[in-house]
Amino acid sequence: MQSSKRTGNQQPNRGTKVSRREVVGRAAAGAGALALVGKVPAAFAQASDVIKIGFVSPRTGPLGGFGEGDPYVLSLARNALANGLGSGGKKYKVQILDKDSQSDPARASQLAKSLINDDKIDLMLTTSTPEVVNPVADACDAAGMPCVSTILPWESWYFGRGGKPGQTPFPFKWSFHFSFGVAQFAQAYISEWSKAPFTTNKKVGVMFPNDADGNALREHEIPLFEKAGFTVFDPGGYEDGTTDYSAQIAKYKAAGVQIFTGVPIPPDFAVFWRQAAQLGFAKTVKIQSIAKTGLFPSQMEALGSLAYNIASLCYWHPTFPYKSPLTGKTSKELADGYEKSTGRQWNQQLGGTQSLLDVGAALLKSTDPKNKEGLVDKLNAFKVTTAVGVVDFGHGPVPHVSTTPLIGAQWIKAKQGSKHRLDLVIVDNADDPNVPIGAKLQPYS
Amino acid sequence: MIWITQLLNGVLLGGYYALLACGLSFMFGVMRIINLAHGDLAILCACVVFFIADQTGISPFVALIVALPLMAAIGFWLQRLMLERSLRGGMLVPLLTTFGLAIVIENGLFEYFGADSRSLAPYIGDFAFDSWAIPGNIYIGSLALLIFAVAVVLLGGLKLFLTHTSLGRAIRATAEDPDTAGLVGINARYVYAVAAAIAVASAGLAGVFLAMRETFSPYSGPTQLIFAFEAVVIGGIGSLSGTLVGGIVLGIAQTFGAQINPQGFLIAGHVVFLVVLAGRLAAGALQARGGLHRLFARRS
C-alpha cells in the first residue's frame, strides 16, 4: 500500500539510448577488465553458468508464521536442483538466495534492492501478505527484474500498488502474481453455505475491519453474497486492535444472523469470539466461516474448545491431487515430510511456497534463464501445474495475474490418538473439483 | 438498556486496562522511568506460565505461584544491573534502555517460542467464556469480572502497602527525594529495586490475564502498551487510584464510542486521552502564570 503512487513510468529506460554516465561507467569497467585480462574468461564463464534466484518471505516478526515451513521447502528445492538445472541444452548451477523480510515492508524493499544490485539475481520470487510482496514487486518493476509472487489476494497486489481497472499499457511490466482473489472467496463461501447439509436462515453477519482486506471485501464480496440470495448484515468497519466487541455482538444478535464470516486479524478474532461466547451469540451461529484467521493450526488451538467446527478456506491441503513438478513429491509427501522433519503440524504455506518454487524452476527451464526480457515474454502466457493447482498467466482477470483456487475446509476436533489437537478437513470443492471432499460441513452449534 | 450493557462492559474493560497500567504507573511514580518494555515483560510472564501449563498440565492460576516471584526477581535485578546504571545518564537513557530491552525480549521469545499465536484460554477451559446472565438480557463475563476484581485488589493493596507499611513509606520517601531519604537511613538502592520488582510482577500478572483473554505472540507487547499508557495519563501519572479511574474512563469511552459506530472504539479512547492531556497542560500553564484569578485580575 505504501507505494500506491508508483506506476509504470518508473520502469528503467531499456531503449537503445545510452547515457553519458553509462558510457563512462562502462569505459571504467572495461579498463578494469583489461587490467585483469587473464582472469576475465573464467569469471565470465562462472557468471553465465550460475542462475541466482532471490527469495523473500517473512520468517520472523508478526508474519513469521507464514515463513515457518520455508527452510524445509527450500531444502527440498535445493536437493532437487543439486545436480543443476537444464535449459536450452545447457546445464546451469542454481543458487537460491533466501532472505527474511522480518515482517517489515521497508526491510523487504531493501532486501529486494540488494538482491538485484549486489547479488545480481536472475529471477525474484516472493510470497505472503502485502507487507512482503508489494514492496519486493515494486523494487523489481523499478529495476527491470522479473518477479513472480503468490499468497496475497491479487486485488491487493494490483490495486494496492496503484493499478487501475483496465489500465493499458499494463502498469507492472516485470512483476507477475498468482493467487486467489475476491471472486474465489465469494464462490467458495456461497457454495459452502448453499450446500450445507442443514438449514440456515441465510442471514450473514460480516466482520470486516477498516483495513485493506476488510474494505476490499466489503466493496466486492457483499454484492456477490446478496446476488446469491443471502441477506448480509454489516455493522461497519472497526479498527484492527479493538479490545472489546460487545457493541457489534449486540447488533449481530439483534439481526439474528446464523452465518458468520470476516477477515479479522487473528488476535482480534480470539477476543471477539470469546466475547461472542460470553454474550450468548456464538451458540446461535450455525456456520462460522472465517478467513485470514485460521490459516495456521496454532491460531485455532489458541481458541480452545471454541475452535471446533470453525470453517475456513484453504489454498493448499495434503489431499490436493497435484505433484510438485520440481521435487516430484505429492502433497501428502510434502506434508508428511515436514511433520517428520520438524515435529510440527503441516500448514498451508508449505504448498504456497512449494508452488512458487515450482513456477520459478519451470520458467527457468523453459527459456534462456539469462535473458530477462525473454523471461517476461515467456511469463505472459506461462502455464504450469504446481502444488496448489494450475497456474496460467494467459487467462487471468488482468494481465500478469493467474487466479488459483480456494477450497472450503473446516477445523474439527482431532480423532482420539492423533498427534494434533485439530484437523483441517475439506468440505467443499467448488473452485477446483479435482480436490477430493473429505467430510460434510458440520454445524458450529 | 444497551447503554447500560455497554457501561458495564466498559467498566470491566477498564479493570483490565488498569491492571495492565498498574506497573507502568508505579514504576514512573517511584523511579521516574517510563518502562517501554512493560508490555514485553507482560508477554514474557505469559510465556513462562504457558510453558508451565503446557509442560505439566497444571492450571495457569497455580503456575502464577512460580511465575510471579520469578518476575519479581527479574524486576529486582533489572533495576540493579541495568536501570540503576542508566538512570545516572539522565532521563533519556532509561527510556532507550527499556526500548532496547523490549527488542531483546521480543526476539529472545521468538527464538524460543516461534511466531505462533498462543493463548492460556484452553488451559482454563470454559472459564474463558463463561458468563452470568442477569435480567434484562445482560451478560457478565466471569473472566472479565475476575480481571476487574484483581485490578481493584492489586491497586488497593498497593495503596495500603504504600501508606501503612514501613517499606511502603520508604518507597514514598525515596520517590519524593532519594537523597534526603538516604540521610534518614533509607537504602535507596534497595527501595528502588523492590519497587521495580513489584512493578514487573504486576506487569506479569497483567500479561497472564491478557493471555487468558486474548491470544499472544512474542510481538504482542507493544500494542498493549498504548492502552496502559493512556490509562496512566488519563488517571494522573504516578497515582494508583487514578490509574483505576483512568482505565475505567478509557474503557467506557471505547465501548460507548463503539456503540455509536464500530469505528469509534479506538478513536473515542484516543480523544478522551487527548482532551485530558490538553486539559492538564492548559491547567499546568495556567498554574505557572499564577492561576485563574490572576488571569482575570490582569484583564480587568
Image: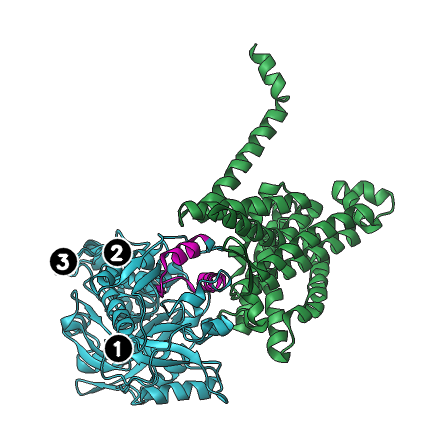
Up-down: is B218 above or below B193?
Answer: below
Q: Colour of chain A?
A: cyan
Residues at marks 2 and 3, CA–CA distance in whole angstroms: 18 Å
At numbered mark 2, what does the secondary structure look like: helix, strand or loop?
helix
Q: Tell me the crowding category of disc 1: few under 14, some 14 to 19, or many 20 or more residues within 10 angstroms, Cα based.
A: some
Chain drawn green, letter? B
Which residue type carries mark 2? Glu
- Region rendered in magenta: A247-276
Task: Based on the picture, tell me whether residue A270 belongs to the magenta stretch.
Answer: yes
Whether residues under marks 3 and 1 lie with C-beta atoms below 8 angstroms apart, the answer is no
- Earlier along the polypeptide chain: callout 3 or callout 1? 3
- Residue B68 in the image: state x and y as whole percent: 69, 64
Q: Is the magenta stretch mostly helix, strand or loop?
A: helix
Q: Which mark is residue A166?
A: 3
- Point 46% across, 64% down: residue: A273
What colour scheme governs how the chains and residues are painted in the rendered image of this protein? by chain
State the mark number for residue A219: 2
On screen, residue A431 versus residue B245, left or right, reads: left
Q: Secondary structure under badge 3?
A: loop
Label 1 is found on which chain of the structure? A
Q: In whole angstroms, how far apart are the C-alphas of marks 2 and 1?
A: 33 Å
**Magenta segment: does it hold A176?**
no
Residue B169 is labelled as none
Q: In which quarter of the image is the C terminus of chain B?
A: top right
The answer for which chain carries disc 3 is A
Residue A328's spot in the image, x, y percent?
29, 90
Question: How many badges with numbers are in the image?
Answer: 3
- The quadrant where residue A358 appears: bottom left
- The residue that label 1 is drawn on is A360
